Image (cartoon, rainbow, N blue to C red):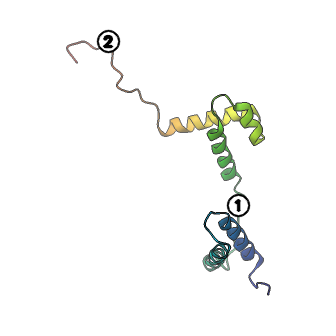
């Protein structure tokens, strides 16, 4: 018997079930049941409203950049570039952006740096 659910909800259910089924220890039945609950809850919360679903390009690019940073080991820039289908220059750019972002969050502060010109009496 064909489901009477709208196409979008059927597709959401299918995608969630597929993703859950690849998780170790999750049975096909449990994945399908959870997927149906997710689709029904989505319909309950968003039903009747016009919903725009963004493509999420910035999110996907951010994920790829994170993977690039994690893959670089210091001497494998060309291999990382080939693996992700980008140029070596792009790998360097991603690393530079990641470094700048890390420094903006927690700038490097000198550890217990002493003043060489401070007089002995002040110490």
Q: Nearer the viewer, residue 73 or 86?
A: 73
In space, the residues marked 2 and 1 are separated at their CA atoms by 59 Å
Q: Nearer the viewer, residue 43 or 68?
A: 68
- Identified at 64% across, 79% down, the residue is 40
Q: Check residue 111 in the rendering and tell me which mark sits there, or answer none.
A: none
Q: Quadrant of the N terminus?
A: bottom right
- Identified at 66% across, 28% down, the residue is 75
- Graded by Cα atoms within 10 Å as few (under 14), some (14 to 19) or many (20 or more), the crowding at tag 1 reads few
Q: Check residue 117 in the rendering and tell me which mark sits there, or answer none.
A: 2
In terms of secondary structure, where does tag 1 sit? loop
Compared with 20, 37 (above or below) is below
- Graded by Cα atoms within 10 Å as few (under 14), some (14 to 19) or many (20 or more), the crowding at tag 2 reads few
Q: Are marks 2 and 1 in contact (CB under 8 Å)?
A: no
Compared with 77, 11 (above or below) is below
Question: Residue 9's x, y, as percent?
Answer: 72, 76
Question: Residue 11's x, y, as percent?
Answer: 75, 72
Which residue appears farthest toward the left when viewing the image?
A: 121
In terms of secondary structure, where does tag 2 sit? loop
Q: Check residue 54 in the rendering and tell me which mark sits there, or answer none.
A: 1
Compared with 86, 45 (above or below) is below
Q: Nearer the viewer, residue 98 or 104?
A: 98
Which residue appears farthest toward the bottom when viewing the image?
A: 1
- Identified at 38% across, 27% down, the residue is 111
Residue 98 falls in which quadrant of the image?
A: top right
Q: Quadrant of the C terminus?
A: top left
């Amino acid at each position: 018997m064909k489901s009477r659910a709208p196409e979008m909800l059927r597709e959401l259910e299918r995608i969630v079930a597929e993703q859950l089924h690849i998780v170790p220890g999750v049975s096909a039945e449990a994945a399908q049941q959870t997927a149906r609950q997710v689709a029904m809850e989505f319909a309950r919360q968003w039903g009747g409203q016009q919903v725009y679903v963004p493509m999420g390009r910035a999110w996907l690019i951010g994920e790829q950049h994170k993977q690039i940073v994690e893959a670089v080991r210091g001497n494998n820039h060309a291999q990382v570039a080939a693996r992700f289908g980008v140029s070596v220059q792009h790998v360097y750019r991603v690393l530079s952006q990641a470094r700048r972002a890390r420094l903006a969050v927690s700038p490097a502060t000198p550890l217990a740096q002493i003043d060489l010109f401070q007089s002995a009496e002040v110490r």
